[in-house]
Amino acid sequence: MTQNRTPLVEMRDISISFGGIHAVDSASVDLFPGEVVALLGHNGAGKSTLIKILSGAYRRNAGEIFINGEQVEINNPRDAKQFGIETIYQTLAVADNVDAAANLYLGRELRTPWGTLDDVAMEAKAREVMGRLNPNFQRFKEPVRALSGGQRQSVAIARAILFDARILIMDEPTAALGPQETAQVGELITQLKREGIGIFLISHDIHDVFDLADRVFVMKNGRVVGHARTEDVTKDEVLGMIIMGKVPPGAVAGPGAAQMA
Amino acid sequence: MTDQTIAVPSSSARHAKGNLWQRFFHATELDTRLLGMVFALVVIWVGFDILSGGLFLSSRNLWNLSVQAASVSVMATGMVLVIVTRNIDLSVGSILGFVGMIMAVTQTKYLPALLGFDHPLTWILTLSVGIALGGAIGAFQGAIIAFLGVPAFIVTLGGLLVWRGAAWMVTSGATVAPMDTTFRLMGGGADGSIGATASWIVGIVACVFIVLSIIHSRRQRKRFGFPLKPIWAEYFTGIVGCGVLLGAVNVLNSYYMPVNLARRYAEANGIAWPEGGLEIPLGIAIPVLIALGIAVVMNFLTNRTRFGRYVFAIGGNPEAAELAGIKTRWVTVRIFALMGVLCAIAAAISTARLNAATNAQGTLDELYTIAAAVIGGTSLAGGMGTIAGAVLGAIVMQSLNSGMVLLGMDAPLQSIVIGLVLVFAVWLDTVYRARAR
């Protein structure tokens, strides 16, 4: 099935180390269009670091990145955005002191013919996008600081889809949210998936993402333990991969798999 | 988390109701904090006026106050951007001193040798040299902060010592005077003022701008179907804005040239000296015009351009700004370069006003500048601050200064009062912010 197509993203043998510690050690992951891939692992397993290489926040020490089968160089966040890679960070990367529209367009502001900021046009577009995402959202004039966690998250997500992302990276997208808002994000992911966007979901909590994901990659100590289609494995088996690095029969073992005695 | 989400609708609904004042502020979209500062300024002015027996609010004193506040006000507008990005610039006073000295030497030593004395181009060449130098110094310090990662506090503390020393080395500590006659106009005085007619024209043009911008913003809101301000609120903002502006012009126009100068002016222009003396209004002083122009430009820069947007985004969340693809380091360099340019302009105003460049010029100005920005509501934690606030802050500082001089207070007591006011103002601001949450 999907395996014969060209992957939207393929990261091959990626390594990065910080001061002698191998945060990521020759890890390979791939993602197909319209697919949701969950990247699982404990805190410190290297999943966020791996994905930050894709989004341009870190520069890899070794390895190759392919987008639609073509090798690309990603050295900073601007490069990543050029390839349609948008990231929603765990730490809610919004500037607290400016309003929603300013955050949506941060780094890519709309401008008038005179080169000044076209705030009105940005606000109009922001109202349109936010209306689609979260119809209850009304507080366009206030600094983002005044918003709730869910509202801030919808600003961050709106920012990603505003620029026609093809590859969406969501780092712990629901960590700061209540149950209702989590459900909202889930619906949104399904909707984006239908539009053919490939999504990386990163989480340390399997329950957050298992039902949303088509495939899971599990990381441990900077290495990929293995990957599996969610229909081939159970939650408990995946938990076994996360905790002990034990690869169940339904999964494909990676370099980080525990050696069976 | 959940109760936070429930609290949201109630807080947005609050705006619609509330008492008369709340509705008034909501409709006019006035910045209540700025309004508080204006109120504080009024209290200071009226207080000094009563204590000094009506001397403080005389047109003469207000005219002088406007000129004295100009130099710090120019620098404070730049300091806002520096502080908003969580940096600080301690070197502005020394840069002012050094650039002022270089400009003085340029116009008294080098340019006369090239162009001859009192050449009409002298002032603009001198100013260009100063602005280029100030910008270069600022960019250099900014580059060290942004690319080498040395904290701004340390880099500019170093700059404070380096540029003060450099100013001394230019002339081995000697004072340079006098300045070019055209250059001196930037310092104000009887010649460096634009007179009554021109002042009224400036005032009226500014009023037209206020009205046009209100109309423009209303049209824009209509075009995109955003909620409109009530029409009475638009009229209110327009009328109060224009009223304050024209009132200020009127005050500056009712300060007349001192008798001796007026007599000289009359002789120079062939006007017969009448019995009761001549009343020649000075109007807006050129340094004040420069300071206002800078404030308008800086306000435009912070609110209407990408650069300004980035400055505030970096101040709010440096990491988010970087991840959004903003070249945060370059923005930092540009902020400090801009600060340097503003120091050069302030240096021009202050050397022109003194008609000399001295080795001690601008000493402690960094503290007055920072104080003006902070009193004007710029948060040292970053991300918050307005240009209008900084200008008001500069006026508050200068009002305290000149008021205490009028009352004949001792200099040590003056600095004690200013120090206390600074701490008090920041405390008030902290309380306000805590309640605004």
Image: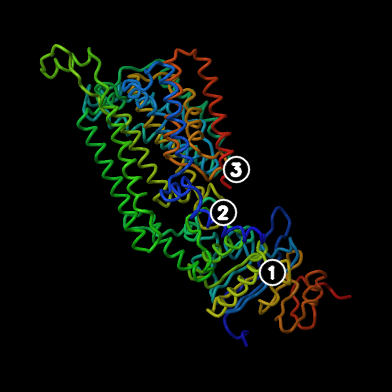
Q: Which residue is outermost to the right?
A: A261
The local secondary structure at tag 1 comes to strand
* Mark number displayed over residue A146: 2
Above or below, B177 against B20 in this view is above
Mark 2 — on which chain does it sit? A
Label 3 sits on what residue type?
Ala
* Mark number displayed over residue A27: 1
The local secondary structure at tag 2 comes to helix
Q: What x and y, as percent, mark residue A132?
A: 50, 71
List the residue tagged with mark 3: B434
Quadrant of the rendering where the N terminus of chain A is positioned: bottom right
Q: What x and y, as percent, mark residue B315?
A: 53, 46
Question: Disc 1 vs disc 3: which is toward the camera?
Answer: 3
The local secondary structure at tag 3 comes to helix
Image quarter of residue A42: bottom right
Above or below, B345 against A252 in this view is above
For marks 1 and 3, give the CA distance.
47 Å
Image quarter of residue B434: top right
Q: Which residue is outermost to the bottom?
A: A1
Same chain for mark 3 and mark 2? The answer is no
Residue under the image location 49 percent in, 66 percent down: A82
The earlier-in-sequence mark between 1 and 2 is 1
Image quarter of residue A14: bottom right
Residue under the image location 73 percent in, 66 percent down: A204
Q: Nearer the viewer, residue B26 or A141?
A: B26
Q: What x and y, as percent, mark residue A163?
A: 48, 67
For marks 1 and 2, give the CA distance.
40 Å
Residue under the image location 66 percent in, 77 percent down: A213
Label 1 sits on what residue type?
Ala
For marks 3 and 2, give the CA distance.
13 Å
